[in-house]
Amino acid sequence: MDPQLQQAQAATQQFMQQYGLDARTMASIGQVAQEAIQDQSLYAILREQLLGSQILTEKELPEQVNYMTLAALASMGALAGGE
């Protein structure tokens, strides 16, 4: 297996454990993040949910769309979902 893929999977597992997320929840977050990259109206909804759950901070998800964080969440969701 590619070492970078292994590292990404390990980081995803660590993130999920840190916040008590199961694979289905992480995959769902990733899917919404992927959709929010193309539909900015979804960003506010995702942001509210992740801030309210204390999964991410205001710095990580500012009011203005943060595409880097969305891309990371989408990637982690795909890894968690086995895609």
Image (tube, rainbow, N blue to C red):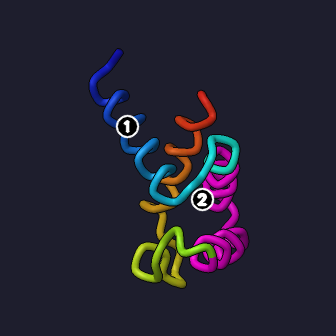
Q: Residue at x 37, y 44 (%)?
A: 11
Residue span colored magenta? 27-52
- Neighbour class for label 2 at 10 Å: few (<14), some, many (≥20)? some
Q: Above or below — where is 48 with respect to 18?
A: below
Indicate yes or no whether the magenta region holds residue 40: yes
Helix, strand or loop at label 1? It is helix
The picture quadrant where one finds residue 9 is top left
Q: Position of residue 32 (x, y in %)?
A: 69, 56
Residue 10 is marked as 1
Q: Are marks 2 and 1 in contact (CB under 8 Å)?
A: no
Q: Above or below — where is 51 with respect to 74?
A: below
Q: Position of residue 39 (x, y in %)?
A: 70, 63
Q: Position of residue 77 (x, y in %)?
A: 58, 44
The single residue placed furthest to the left in the displayed view is 3
Distance, label 2 to label 1, CA atoms, is 24 Å
Residue 37 is marked as 2
